[in-house]
């Protein structure tokens, strides 16, 4: 199979590179950046932390405090001290983010509600390359197994940013920024294991090729145990493993030009009951534990040109190839992406950014009775053009106006305008406001899929999900207000308030009377269904974040999120899915409190408590819960870190989410313990 062939090539490549990496002439720096010293970021004030430069908040380098948006940055120190072992877990610390674990390898992650297994209103990128899946319009979080030690920061914007990043950047945008090869010189060896994360580890080595060129290679793998079953449900059997290889080259081509080349190859094998299998004879449908076997490879290059007068050019090109196999289908897909931007200043008051992007998506499916695509092969071509002007009206007032025009294969032309104000009346107070429009695209499944499955939440019926090529974009008009208040040098409050009007929101209706299919010998009636734009959903809420540096050795961070939904749904429609799903499946209140405390110069004690309100998903009630994670870190040697982590310590197990359409066996998340170490050489 091509997946196994890719793995064999990966193993062979690693064996060739290992002697080169281990016997390289360069040695690790005395103070490498991959594991930050405990006293490097922890004692910084919030003012100093928000002065950290970030790039994806406005497609140009700026600070968080100067961003007229609900912006949040997760640093490498936050990641290291969180005790988290996956990308999705880390996002729990962002106010306004809804993060719920479905089972061992699946997560529901969104911003400002609308959460589901494949949330379609959150754009996610890795170094500017989208990892958003065009089949489901969501992110397969269980397949994202980048080494956490390679991440420099995670930049998060809540609210629309479609004018900059295009379709599906509706309720939020996440950009995962990895470390440069220059910042990861020398070696890093890490390993660990526990009750849920059964085993994980990796090795990384960075090599200086010349005074201006650096290379890094990282290999990592993990093995994960099954989650617990819900009462009266079958065994989830959702254990699995994943392997990942990443290589990155960074080079200064001259005083004004930089080049980044990156290659990534990953494989995963996730067992679980996914969809189940429909058949024309008895028993007509049955669970399967095959899960998903897949691989993905990507190549990315980024060239940037920066002149002394501030003129900047960037060209980002990426190719991604994905293959997976399930019991009910196989898929191959190739994606090509080109992103160009040009930025310059005019009259010292205007900062102009303009650019264009092109995306081609070519896929093919092997169809079965359970899941089929018509046509089985298809190519999408999407193109966009954007323009932004950031103008300093006065020393205290800044206006940002932007728009994007895009053409999509499925829906034609769309526009995504955006206007924002930033007012700084005092160095300790900043106010911002914004109004914007963003769109969510129909996905390949909604346009072309045919599903035949039992309706687990409508007993005695099968349903046939039929294609609807008239599905239009969902569009959101968002109104936002924000206030950043530096109460003291050690205490800061960041607040955001929003009101969103989402039109043409998609849902599923029964598109005809139940019928008996003579070729499908089961006597249960089949309900024809289709996805369409049938609803309007209004949402409003607030997000608060408090950062308190108690002293040099102790920092605390707290956040609160509250959201409410009002849905307009015609009661005369033959609803097949719940038309009030948003207000039921998203917690109205959530709270997070993190403490990072240095007991001594060598010992760290970190705690993370979270409260998540009750929800209801597909008519299954999931109670609210409180969780507590603890981490004890020890640095017995300069280059050695050992840590013990306990997660979900307050109960044996609890459910967080489910999706009975795709995963018919609901799971509970268990208490877990793990130990890990990292050694630099």
Image (cartoon, rainbow, N blue to C red):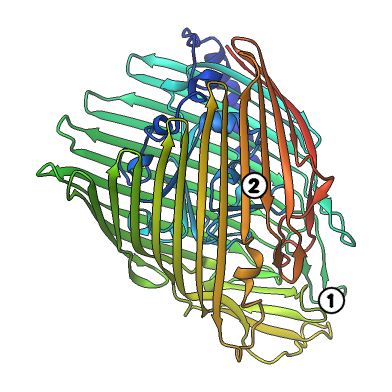
292 and 605: which one is in front? 605
- Which residue in the protein does label 2 denote? 142
Query: Residue 477 location in percent, x, y?
Result: 39, 68
Give the mark nearest the N terminus, 1 or 2: 2
Query: Residue 492 location in percent, x, y?
Result: 46, 39
Q: Is residue 28 left or right of residue 632?
A: left
- Answer yes or no: is residue 157 visible: no
Residue pushed farthest right?
A: 232
Q: Secondary structure at mark 1?
A: loop
280 and 123: which one is in front? 123
Q: Is residue 188 left or right of residue 677?
A: left
Residue visible at 62% across and 82% down in the picture: 509
Q: Quadrant of residue 608?
A: top right
- Answer yes or no: is residue 457 visible: yes
Q: Is residue 614 left or right of residue 586?
A: right
Q: Quadrant of residue 302?
A: top left
Looking at the figure, which quarter contains the C terminus? top right
Task: Count the marks.
Answer: 2
Nearer to us of marks 1 and 2 is 2
Query: Residue 565 location in percent, x, y?
Result: 56, 70
Residue pushed farthest front?
A: 488
* The disc label shown at residue 524, or none: none
Q: Is residue 186 above or below residue 203?
A: above
Categorize mark 2 by other alpha carbons within 10 Å: few (<14), some (14-19), many (20+): some
Residue visible at 59% across and 9% down in the picture: 638
Residue visible at 44% across and 24% down in the picture: 181
Q: Quadrant of residue 452?
A: bottom right
CA distance for labels 1 and 2:
34 Å
Query: Residue 578 location in percent, x, y?
Result: 66, 76
Q: Is residue 640 above or below residue 424?
A: above
- Which residue in the protein does label 1 denote? 281
């Amino acid at each position: 199979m091509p997946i196994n062939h890719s793995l064999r090539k990966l193993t062979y490549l690693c064996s060739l590179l290992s002697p080169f990496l281990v016997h390289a002439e360069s040695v690790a720096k005395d103070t490498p950046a991959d594991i930050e010293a405990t006293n490097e970021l922890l004692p910084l004030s919030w003012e100093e932390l928000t002065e950290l430069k970030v790039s994806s908040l406005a497609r140009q380098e700026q600070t968080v405090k100067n961003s007229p948006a609900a912006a949040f940055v997760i640093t490498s120190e936050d990641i290291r001290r969180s005790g988290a072992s996956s990308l999705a877990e880390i996002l729990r610390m962002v106010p306004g983010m809804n993060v719920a674990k479905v089972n061992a390898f699946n997560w529901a992650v969104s911003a400002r509600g609308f959460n589901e297994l494949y949330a379609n209103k959150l754009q996610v990128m890795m170094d500017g390359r989208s990892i958003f899946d065009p089949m489901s319009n969501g992110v397969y979080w269980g397949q994202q197994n980048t080494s956490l030690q390679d991440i420099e920061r995670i930049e998060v914007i809540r609210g629309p940013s479609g004018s900059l990043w295009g379709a599906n950047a509706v309720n939020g945008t996440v950009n995962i920024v990895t470390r440069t090869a220059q910042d990861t010189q020398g070696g890093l060896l890490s390993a660990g294991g526990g009750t849920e994360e059964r085993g994980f580890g990796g090795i990384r080595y960075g090599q200086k090729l010349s005074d201006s060129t650096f290379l890094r290679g990282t290999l990592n793998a993990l093995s994960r145990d099954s989650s617990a079953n819900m009462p009266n449900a079958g065994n989830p059997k959702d254990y699995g493993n994943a392997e990942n290889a990443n290589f990155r080259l960074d080079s200064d081509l001259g005083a004004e030009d930089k080049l980044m080349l990156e290659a990534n190859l990953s494989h995963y094998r996730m067992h679980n009951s996914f969809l189940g299998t429909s058949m024309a004879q008895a028993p007509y449908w049955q669970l399967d534990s095959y899960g998903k076997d897949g691989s993905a490879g990507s190549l990315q290059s980024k060239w940037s040109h920066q002149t002394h007068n501030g003129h900047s050019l960037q060209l980002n090109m990426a190719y991604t190839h994905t293959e997976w196999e399930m019991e009910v289908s196989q898929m191959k897909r190739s994606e090509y992406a080109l992103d160009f931007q040009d930025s310059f200043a005019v009259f010292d008051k205007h900062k102009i950014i303009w650019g264009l992007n092109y995306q081609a998506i070519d896929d093919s499916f092997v169809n079965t009775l359970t899941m089929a695509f018509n046509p089985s092969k298809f190519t999408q071509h999407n193109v966009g053009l954007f323009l932004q002007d950031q103008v300093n009206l006065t020393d205290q007032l800044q206006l940002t106006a932007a728009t994007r025009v895009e053409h999509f294969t499925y829906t034609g032309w769309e526009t995504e305008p955006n206007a924002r104000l930033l007012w700084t009346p005092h160095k300790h107070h900043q106010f911002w406001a914004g109004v914007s429009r963003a769109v969510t695209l129909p996905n390949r499944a909604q346009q072309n899929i045919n599903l035949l499955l039992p309706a687990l939440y409508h007993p005695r019926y099968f349903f046939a999900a039929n294609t609807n090529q008239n599905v239009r974009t969902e569009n959101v008009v968002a109104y936002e207000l924000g206030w950043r208040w530096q109460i003291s040098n050690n205490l800061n409050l960041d607040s955001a308030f929003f009101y969103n009007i989402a039109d043409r929101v998609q849902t599923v209706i029964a598109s005809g009377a139940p019928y008996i299919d003579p070729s499908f010998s089961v006597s249960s009636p089949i309900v024809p269904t289709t996805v369409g734009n049938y609803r309007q959903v209004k949402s409003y809420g607030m997000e608060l974040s408090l950062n308190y540096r108690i002293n040099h050795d102790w920092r605390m961070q707290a956040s609160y999120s509250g959201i409410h939904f009002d849905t307009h749904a015609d009661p005369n429609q033959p609803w097949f899915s719940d038309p009030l799903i948003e207000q039921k499946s998203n917690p109205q209140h959530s709270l997070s409190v993190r403490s990072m405390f240095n007991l001594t110069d060598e010992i760290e004690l970190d705690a993370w408590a979270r409260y998540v309100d009750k929800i209801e998903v597909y008519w299954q009630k999931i109670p609210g819960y409180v969780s507590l994670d603890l981490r004890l870190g020890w640095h017995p040697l300069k280059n050695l870190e050992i840590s013990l982590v306990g997660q979900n310590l307050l109960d044996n197990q609890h459910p967080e989410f489910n999706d009975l359409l795709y995963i018919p066996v609901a799971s509970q998340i268990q208490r877990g313990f793990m130990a890990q170490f990292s050694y630099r050489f």
